[in-house]
Image (cartoon, grey):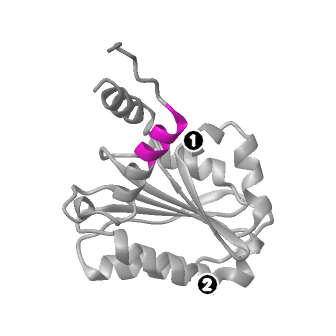
């Protein structure tokens, strides 16, 4: 029998990334017993949001109910023509979760080009815990083009897209590169 070296394949890396996203999207029992994380919500604040605001708000609020736990730190960005933080706080009570949801309901769209790059860069640099969950909401197909072709495109390297009618939700794994490399190396060295 020959001793063959196992080479990483796209399929194996895909399986590993799927596992990482299952943990961070609430589909794993591990997620229910986790340490507090940083939750970043980056919502398209451009005029494209206007006709989709109710649908997006309902979906995001449902997602928050699935992922938020006591102790999580939440930051919400309005990615309008210039990104700005509209909420930041720690989740200790039901009132804290209600305040996050209110900030999303009260988000007012303005401008034509959302500043996802600024919000992603800010979210990446402000991560205080070991892990984060970043959800980016794009209200138009063209809205992501600036971030995909700009200097922050590498921040979307570990992301998963959910397509909806007229909008997209991206779960973005910020600051995961070194962890993914270590996990892949450990997985393939068995």
Q: Would you name the residue on which mark 2 appears?
A: 55
Secondary structure under tag 2 reads helix
Is residue 106 visible in the rendered image? The answer is no
Q: Is 130 displayed left or right of 116 in the figure?
A: left
Whether 80 is among the magenta residues is no
Q: Give the range drawn in magenta.
A: 9-17
Q: Which residue lies furthest to the top in this view?
A: 2
Q: Is residue 6 visible?
A: yes
Q: What secondary structure do most residues of the magenta stretch adopt?
A: helix
Near mark 1 (Cα within 10 A), the count class, few <14, some 14-19 or many ≥20, is: some
Q: Which residue lies furthest to the left in this view?
A: 33
Q: Is residue 117 above or below residue 99?
A: above
Q: Residue 96 carries which label?
A: none
Compared across the picture, whether 44 is left or right of 173 comes to: right
**Where the N terminus falls, by quadrant?**
top left
| Left or right: where 114 falls relative to 156 | right
The residue labelled by disc 1 is 157
Which quadrant holds the C terminus? top left
- Residue drawn at x 41%, y 23% as measured from the top left: 6
């Amino acid at each position: 029998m020959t001793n063959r070296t196992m080479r990483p394949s796209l399929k194996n890396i895909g399986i590993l990334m799927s596992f990482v996203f299952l943990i961070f999207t609430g589909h794993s029992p591990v997620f229910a017993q986790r340490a507090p994380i940083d939750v970043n919500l980056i919502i398209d604040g451009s005029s494209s949001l206007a006709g989709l605001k109710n649908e997006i708000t309902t979906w995001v609020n449902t997602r928050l109910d699935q992922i938020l736990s006591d102790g999580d730190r939440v930051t919400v960005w309005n990615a309008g023509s210039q990104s700005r933080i509209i909420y930041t706080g720690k989740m200790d009570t039901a009132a804290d979760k209600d305040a996050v949801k209110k900030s999303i309901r009260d988000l007012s769209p303005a401008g034509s080009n959302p500043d996802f790059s600024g919000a992603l860069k800010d979210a990446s640099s402000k991560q205080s815990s070991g892990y984060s969950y970043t959800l980016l909401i794009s209200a138009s197909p063209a809205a992501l083009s600036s971030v995909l072709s700009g200097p922050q495109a590498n921040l979307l390297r570990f992301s998963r897209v959910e397509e909806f009618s007229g909008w997209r939700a991206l779960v973005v794994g910020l600051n995961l590169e070194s962890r993914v490399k270590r996990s892949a190396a450990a997985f393939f060295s068995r």
